[in-house]
Image (cartoon, rainbow, N blue to C red):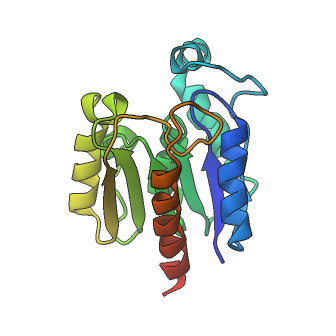
């Protein structure tokens, strides 16, 4: 079974994040979900991003790195949207990562000053008409990463919702989340192959 370090999105540690992690735990995985927002919760992405701009993107990534320092190097880094920043930085730059799971986001690998580790498995999930994922460059960054990695998959789902796997939000899509979780379980099962 895998050990996963999962970073939340710009609304904070919502009930939906805990529901998602409970699904992973029920499948036998160990999941850690640090709070990068010190207890702050937001009802809109704009409000959450205003908070992030206040404290700084670098600080968010640093909080992610501090959280990771408590866990073994051989871990799967996962993130939802904003949380992908910390997850991708750690997966890409911290030696020993087992894998990476990115939901609703991906940034250019050049942002972290090194290429994606060619043999590090990664799955990236997003909706094909999500304005954040498609219109803000994430899909191009995803395609670039997938082209350079030996074990990378992009899963595009029909729809325009951003945080579709968070069951506590109006954007939640139960059917798509079920498929996403099946793919995540398969990914985690094969990490030891």
The quadrant the N terminus occupies is bottom right
Q: Considering depth in this image, is 2 or 164 the residue closer to the camera?
A: 164
Could you tell me residue 160's position as x and y percent?
A: 35, 34
Please report the residue visible at 71 percent of the width from the left and 23 percent of the height from the top: 41
Q: Quadrant of residue 112?
A: top left
Q: Quadrant of residue 15?
A: top right
The reply to whether residue 33 is visible in this rendering is no
> Residue lying furthest right in this view?
39
Please report the residue visible at 56 percent of the width from the left and 56 percent of the height from the top: 77
Could you tell me residue 118's position as x and y percent?
A: 32, 67
Could you tell me residue 113's position as x and y percent?
A: 36, 44
Please report the residue visible at 59 percent of the width from the left and 19 percent of the height from the top: 48
> Residue lying furthest front in this view?
175
Could you tell me residue 144's position as x and y percent?
A: 22, 51
Q: Quadrant of residue 53?
A: top right
The reply to whether residue 20 is visible in this rendering is yes
Q: Examine the rendered structure and indicate whether residue 192 appears above or below residue 75.
A: below
Tag count? 0
Drawn side of residue 92 relative to residue 48, left or right = left
């Amino acid at each position: 079974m895998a050990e996963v370090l999962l970073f939340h999105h710009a609304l904070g540690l919502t009930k939906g994040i805990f529901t998602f992690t409970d699904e992973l735990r029920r499948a036998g995985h160990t999941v850690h979900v640090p709070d990068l927002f010190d207890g702050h919760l937001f009802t809109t992405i704009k409000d959450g991003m205003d908070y992030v701009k206040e404290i700084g993107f670098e600080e968010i990534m640093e909080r992610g790195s501090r959280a990771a320092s408590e866990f073994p190097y051989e871990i799967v880094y996962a993130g939802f949207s904003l949380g992908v920043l910390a997850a991708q930085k750690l997966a890409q730059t911290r030696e020993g990562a087992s894998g990476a799971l990115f939901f609703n986001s991906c940034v250019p690998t050049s942002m972290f000053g090194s290429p994606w580790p060619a043999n590090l498995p990664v799955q990236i999930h997003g909706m094909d008409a999500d304005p954040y994922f498609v219109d803000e460059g994430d899909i191009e960054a995803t395609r670039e990463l997938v082209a350079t990695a030996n074990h990378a998959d992009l899963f595009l789902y029909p729809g325009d919702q951003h945080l579709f796997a968070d069951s506590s939000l109006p954007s939640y899509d139960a059917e798509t989340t079920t498929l996403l979780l099946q793919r995540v379980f398969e990914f985690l099962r094969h990490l030891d192959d």
